[in-house]
């Protein structure tokens, strides 16, 4: 099969698309979350409609006609073919080229001794000494605890930690991780739910690879992964395993975990959580989703046998022009966002997964809570808890201060009495 035949009905792969500027002209930045190609492709913004039409249902001549019909701008078949060929060479289409690259990347990932840190030397220092000094500095900058701490003597069963970069979220990270020190010291098993930014709807994605940090690998609890695969299906839980390679959510939490552990090690169950879009937009209820019930049953049994800490590696809102909003996020909007986030944090503090999900669904996820699946599943797994917010922040997400990512840290304790 020739590449041209394979792309007779071209389909764009799931991509991260952001607005940008190239030589003074508006462009769209296309980034591959799986990094099959390390390059960011820039496409003139006027071709955004063409990208939207690349869903695998149209051949090239039909794409040219559909683009002209929708935009009123003439489009030649040759121009469409040039765009399609360029996207294919950049491995951004679902075609033979990208399939071969995916297979090669998956082989490399599985054959490696462990899952290498994707962000070491980029988002945080690769040198262990420099990294420890950096994280210690964030602990020193941690603000006073946001809300009532409840019974400080009650054991910490879980934490909500950001997955934003340390440069912006460092003090919030420091606030929750240093307050969870005793639970980390006593832990024998750590279950980490992380956002899979490229994950399929309702997916739970596992890996048997150990996650490494600059201090070395943290062992993955293989029997628990095997048990999860046994009830959910090997093909289902490992279909998107390559997402673990570059997904930052779990990595940024495990770096903090390893720092707090010091010379000690602990087994980890790293679980990437896919999109909740189907639950938000449709009538399906995540409380009735069989894969969640079966997975949580396995995890509860495992947690009953060892001192277990559960981590949700999760940010909150993503708002402003950088995320597709028409308006800037000014002071008034910031206050409204804080109010909406406070409602989520109250549900978290009450250990109420249904209320947490309901708050997001009620507004059709207008604030784009990218940490919703990890937080929801953490609350479901832990059940009744007393929660306390350790810190909250609204972090800039563009150079103009018009877009924000909100984050929070929280401790989830065993209820007193």
Image (cartoon, grey):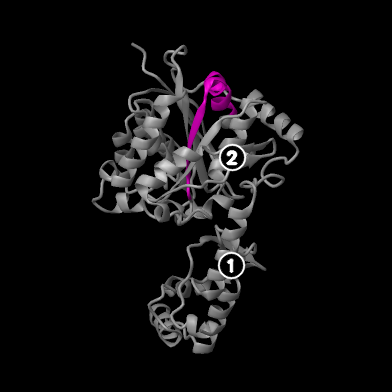
Above or below, comparing residue 409 to residue 86 in the picture: above
Q: Secondary structure at mark 1?
A: helix
Furthest residue toward left: 283
In the rendered image, the quadrant that contains the C terminus is top left
Q: In this picture, is 365 found above or below 44?
A: above
Q: Residues within 10 Å of mark 2 (few under 14, many from 20)?
A: many
Q: Is residue 179 magenta?
A: yes
Residue at (53%, 46%) from the top-left corner?
A: 208
- The residue drawn where x is 42% and y is 25% is 305
In this view, the residue in front, 174 or 236, is: 236
Q: Position of residue 63 (x, y in %)?
A: 43, 82
Q: Please report the bounds of the magenta region as a residue range.
A: 174-196
Q: Residue at x 33, y 24 (%)?
A: 384
The spot of residue 107 in percent (x, y) is 59, 60
Q: Nearer the viewer, residue 406 or 71?
A: 406
Q: Is residue 95 magenta?
A: no
Question: Does residue 391 appear left or right of residue 263 in this picture?
Answer: left
Inspect this view and state whether residue 139 appears: yes
Q: Are there few (<14), some (14-19), or many (20+) residues within 10 Å of tag 1?
A: some
Q: Is residue 415 above or below residue 46?
A: above
Q: Which residue is mark 2?
A: 252
x 61%, y 67%: residue: 41
Tell me which label, 2 or 1, sits earlier in the chain: 1
Which residue does the numbered mark 1 point to in the structure image?
101
* Distance of label 2 from label 1 (alpha carbons): 26 Å
Q: Left or right? Give the position of 290 relative to 257.
A: left
Residue 349 sits in quarter: top left
């Amino acid at each position: 099969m020739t590449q041209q035949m394979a792309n007779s009905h071209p389909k764009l792969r799931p991509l991260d698309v952001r607005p940008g500027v190239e030589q003074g002209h508006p462009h769209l930045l296309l980034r591959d979350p799986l990094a099959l190609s390390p390059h960011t492709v820039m496409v003139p913004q006027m071709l955004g409609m063409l990208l939207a039409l690349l869903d695998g249902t149209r051949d090239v001549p039909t794409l040219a006609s559909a683009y002209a019909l929708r935009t009123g701008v003439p489009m030649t078949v040759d121009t469409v073919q040039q765009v399609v060929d360029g996207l294919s060479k950049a491995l951004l289409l679902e075609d033979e080229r990208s399939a071969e690259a995916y297979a090669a990347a998956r082989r490399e990932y599985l054959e490696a001794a462990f899952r290498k840190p994707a962000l070491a030397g980029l988002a945080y220092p690769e040198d262990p000494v420099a990294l420890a000094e950096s994280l210690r500095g964030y602990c020193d900058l941690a603000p006073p605890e946001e809300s009532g701490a409840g019974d400080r003597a009650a054991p910490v069963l879980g934490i909500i930690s950001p997955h934003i970069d340390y440069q912006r979220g460092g003090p919030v990270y420091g606030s929750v991780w240093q307050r969870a020190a005793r639970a980390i010291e006593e832990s024998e098993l750590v279950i980490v739910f992380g956002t899979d930014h490229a994950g399929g709807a309702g997916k739970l994605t596992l890996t048997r690879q150990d996650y490494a940090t600059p201090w070395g690998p943290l062992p993955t609890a293989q029997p628990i992964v095997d048990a999860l695969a046994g009830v959910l299906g090997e093909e289902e839980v490992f279909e998107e395993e390559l997402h673990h390679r570059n997904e930052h959510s779990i990595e940024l939490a495990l770096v903090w975990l390893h720092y707090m552990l010091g010379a000690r090690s602990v087994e980890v169950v790293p679980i990437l959580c896919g999109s909740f879009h189907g639950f938000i937009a449709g009538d399906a209820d995540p409380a009735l989703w069989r894969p969640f019930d079966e997975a949580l049953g396995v995890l509860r049994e495992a947690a009953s046998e060892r001192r277990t800490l559960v981590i949700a590696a999760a940010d909150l809102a993503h708002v402003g022009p950088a995320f597709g909003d028409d308006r800037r996020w000014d002071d008034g909007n910031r206050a409204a966002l804080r109010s909406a986030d406070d409602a989520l944090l109250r549900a978290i503090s009450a250990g109420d997964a249904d209320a947490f999900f309901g708050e997001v669904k009620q507004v059709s996820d207008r604030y784009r809570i990218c940490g919703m699946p990890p937080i929801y599943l953490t609350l479901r797994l832990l059940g009744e808890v007393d929660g306390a917010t350790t810190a909250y922040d609204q972090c800039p997400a563009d150079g103009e201060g018009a877009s924000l990512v909100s984050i929070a840290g929280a401790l989830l304790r065993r209820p007193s009495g």
